[in-house]
Structures are given as C-alpha cells and as structure tokens.
C-alpha cells in the first residue's frame, strides 16, 4: 500500500536514488525553497554515513574528499547557487563506494589483492607482522588474547597501514599529478608501501616528499608497459 502524507512536499515519496538521478531540466527549474528540501534529504543521508564512518574509526577517500571541499554537509544559510553546490557535494559523496564502511572495506581488500598480484607486495602480511611484533612487545601470544581479539588487532593494523598508504598517495598526487596516470598508480603504491615499511616513523608528508623525486623515473619506466584494464574501482575515483 502506498504511503500517504498529511502535508506532501516535493520530496514526498522520493528515494535518495530518485533525488540523485533527477534530470538536469527538472533540477535547474527548482526554486530555492524546493531545492532546499531536495538537498536536505541528501544532506541527511550523507551526514548519517559520515557519522557511521567516524564512529567506526574509518577515514576513507570519500570522507577525505568531502572534508577538503567544506566538511560536514549542510543547507543552513545557503542561497540557490550554494545549495546547488551542496547538492553536487552530497551527490558525489553518496555515489562513492567508500562513503560506507562496507564499501570501503570491499574496495580496500580488492585493492590490496591487486597490489599483491601486480607488485608482489603483501600488505595484509605486513599488518599481521605488525600485530605479532606488538604482541611480542607485550609479552603475549594469540592464545593469551584469544582469536577474536587477535583478528580485531589485525583488522586495525591493516586499516592503519592501508590508510597511511593512500593518504601518502593523495599527498603525492598534489605534488605531482602524473602519479594518477593509469600505468603509474600501482608502481607508485609500491614505492609508498616500501617506504612505509622501511621508515615507519615517517608521516604522510615526509613519505610523499621522500619518493617525489623518483616519480619521473618511475613514469618513464611504466610508460613503456601496457597494463590494460586496471580495475578496482579506478583507484577510488582518484
């Protein structure tokens, strides 16, 4: 049975997908009042995802992208043009697979698998080694803490290592946009991953600076190779 509304509005009965797929002609004809209602629905959905990610301790590419363009979504105090811009921000965020925990973990795991296949680097094994070192320093074993707690520690270590790799990549891309070249992405990740392993004390900016001078040489080498279809969500839409 169709839902009835006491005071139906423009967005009554519309799903988030309906709003995101609104055609340009309809969208451009919306008044500021109607647009505020439309954007308000996306803002609500987007901020819910933001809270869920933050609650879980996840900092994903989609979340970082949103933070760089203004942070938390809002319609407050915005005129027609500002509402249109906020619609685009909310829509782009919601359309990103890494705007949800499940989507982020899926893309993360697929990317880790591709890095291992293409560059012979096992990030998961490195994370496990991090946890084993941590346990040794604590004077404990897996048996002492239990398998469930051990798995949680591995998941946390994996996410921390992966997050540092991609934040370094994003920083490096700002220094040299050529790293986004399809034939260069995985080689750049390899350099970043190895630098993190060899120099765990370095922060994101230091890692990017350390390998930035190598990018030109890497590009020249990779330009001669044909990797074909890269897959894995086109590198988090980067």
Image (cartoon, grey):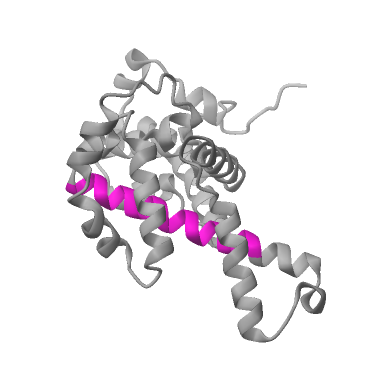
Whether 50 is drawn above or below 39: the answer is below
Residue 45 is left or right of residue 194, and the answer is right
Q: Position of residue 119 (x, y in %)?
A: 46, 40
Q: Is residue 190 magenta?
A: no
The N terminus sits in image quarter: top right
Whether 121 is drawn above or below 142: the answer is above
Closest to the observer: 233 or 23? 233
Residue drawn 33% across and 54% down?
168
Residue drawn 18% across and 43% down?
176
Residue drawn 29% across and 33% down?
84
> Which secondary structure is most common in the magenta stretch?
helix
* Residue 102 seen in the current view: yes
Q: Does the magenta stretch include residue 172?
A: yes
Q: Where is residue 8 in the image (x, y as percent from the top left)?
A: 56, 29
Closest to the observer: 101 or 223? 223
Q: Where on the picture, by quarter, is residue 91?
A: top left
Q: For the magenta stretch, what is the residue range?
A: 154-175
Q: Where is residue 125 in the image (x, y as percent from the top left)?
A: 60, 56
Residue 227 is left or right of residue 13, and the answer is left
Q: Where on the picture, by quarter, is residue 151?
A: bottom right
The C terminus sits in image quarter: top left
């Amino acid at each position: 049975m169709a839902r009835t509304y006491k005071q139906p509005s423009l967005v009554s009965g519309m799903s988030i997908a309906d709003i995101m797929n609104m055609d340009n002609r309809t969208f451009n004809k919306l008044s500021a009042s109607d647009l505020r209602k439309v954007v308000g629905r996306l803002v609500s959905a987007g901020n819910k995802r933001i809270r869920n990610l933050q609650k879980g301790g996840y900092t994903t590419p989609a979340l970082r992208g949103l933070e760089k363009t203004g942070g938390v979504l809002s319609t407050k105090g915005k005129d027609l043009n500002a509402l249109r811009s906020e619609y685009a921000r909310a829509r782009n965020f919601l359309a990103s697979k890494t705007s949800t925990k499940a989507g982020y973990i899926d893309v993360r795991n697929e990317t880790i698998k591709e890095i291992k296949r293409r560059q012979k680097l096992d990030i998961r094994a490195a994370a496990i080694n991090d946890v084993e070192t941590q346990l040794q320093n604590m004077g404990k074993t897996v048996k002492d803490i239990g398998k469930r707690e051990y798995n949680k520690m591995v998941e946390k270590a994996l996410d921390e290592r992966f997050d540092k790799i991609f934040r370094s990549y994003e920083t490096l891309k700002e220094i040299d946009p050529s790293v986004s070249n399809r034939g260069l992405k995985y080689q750049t990740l390899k350099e970043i991953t190895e630098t993190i392993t060899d120099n765990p004390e370095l922060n994101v900016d230091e890692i990017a600076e350390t390998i930035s001078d190598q990018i030109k040489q890497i590009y020249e080498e990779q330009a001669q190779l044909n990797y074909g279809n890269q897959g894995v969500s086109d590198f988090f839409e980067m």
